[in-house]
Amino acid sequence: MKQCDLHTHTTASDGTFTPAQNIRRAVEKGLGAIAITDHDTVNGIHEAMLEAKKHEGFSCIPGIEISTLYKGQDIHVLGYFIDYEDEIFLNALSSLTSVRDKRNKMILENLNHLGIPVMESELEAKRHGKGNVGRGHIAEILMEKGIVNSLPEAFEKYLGKGKAAYASTERISPIEAIQLIKKAKGVPVLAHPGIYGVDELISILSENGLIGLEYNHPDHSRNQVAFYEELADEHSLIKTAGSDFHGFRNGEVFHGDLGSCSVPISTIDVLRSLSK
Ligand SMILES: [Zn+2]
Ligand SMILES: [Zn+2]
C-alpha cells in the first residue's frame, strides 16, 4: 500500500516550494497523497489540487495548520478535508493573518532594539501573493544578512520562545481552533505534540473534539513516537504523521523531506469519512 505525508508547507506560508512543486516532488517520491497544511492560510490549496489531478492515482488533501496559544506555548492544530471556500472560515483566517502580521512587527521592533535592522519591506518582499509570512522568513533574512549561520541558530538566539527578539500576541486557543476547523467540515488533529511539553493538553483536547494525533514527526525521538502512539490509542485518536516539509533553504531541509514521516494511504479514507 502507498504512503501519504499529511503535513507539508508551500510558498503560501513559509515553505520554499510552490504548491505544484510539492505535488510533483511527492509523486516523484512514490507517495500516494499529501496534505497541504500551510500556516493559517488555504491560499496554496487550489493550485495543489489542480496539479494533483494531473497525476493519476495521486490525491491532495486540503488542509491547514492553525497557530494557537495555550499557557504561553505555541500549539499547532492541523485540519484535514476542510471546506477551503467556506466564507466564515476564510474570514476567521484573515483575522489570524492580521494577528500574525502584528506579531511580525513586534519581532522586527525587538530586533531593531538589539541593533539588528530588519525592515518591514524586507519581510514583505518574502511574501508570495496573498500568502503568509512569519518567523521562518525572518530567520531567512537574518541568515542572508550574515547575522546567523543557520535557521536553527536564528531560533536559538533570537526567534524561539523566550529568546532575545521573541514576541507573542493574543491568539486563539487550541479548542477554538478545533471548533473553527469543525465548522468548516474539517477533521482536527494535534500537530507534533512532542515539541510542546504539555501532554495534559491531549486529554483536554480529546474531550473537546480532537480527532487525531500526529504521533510521528521528524522532531520526535523514537521514544516519543512510541509514547504518542500509545497515547493516541488510549484516547481513541487517529494516528497521523507528516514530514512538515518546508522545502529547502540554502540547501538545508527544515524538519524533514517529503515522505520522511508518513502513514498508510488508508488513513485518508478514515479522515475523509470523519469530515462533515
Ligand atoms: Zn507546526
Ligand atoms: Zn508545519
Image (spheres, rainbow, N blue to C red):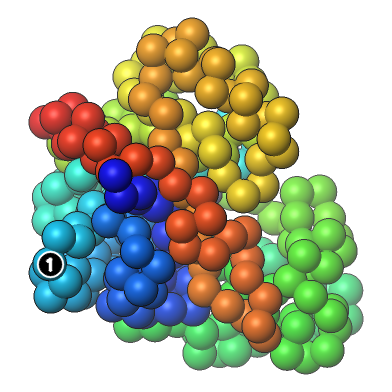
Q: Image height check: is 64 above or below 49?
A: above
Tell me the quadrant of the picture where the N terminus can be found: top left
Give how far across and how far down residue 12 sits, in percent.
37, 72
Residue at image location 58% in from the left, 78% down from the top: 248
Q: Nearer the viewer, residue 221 or 85?
A: 221
Give how far across and how far down residue 215 sits, in percent.
53, 32
Specify whether 15 is left or right of 248.
left
Q: Which residue type carries mark 1?
A: Glu
Residue, disc 1 = 56
Q: Image height check: is 114 above or below 223?
A: below
For label 1, the crowd category at 10 Å Cα-Cα, with few meaning under 14, some 14 to 19 and many 20 or more, is few
Specify whether 208 is left or right of 191.
left
Residue at image location 48% in from the left, 35% down from the top: 214
- Residue 178, image quadrant: top left
Q: Image height check: is 208 above or below 92?
A: above
Residue 202 visible? The answer is no
Residue 218 visible? The answer is yes
Q: Nearer the viewer, residue 184 or 18?
A: 18
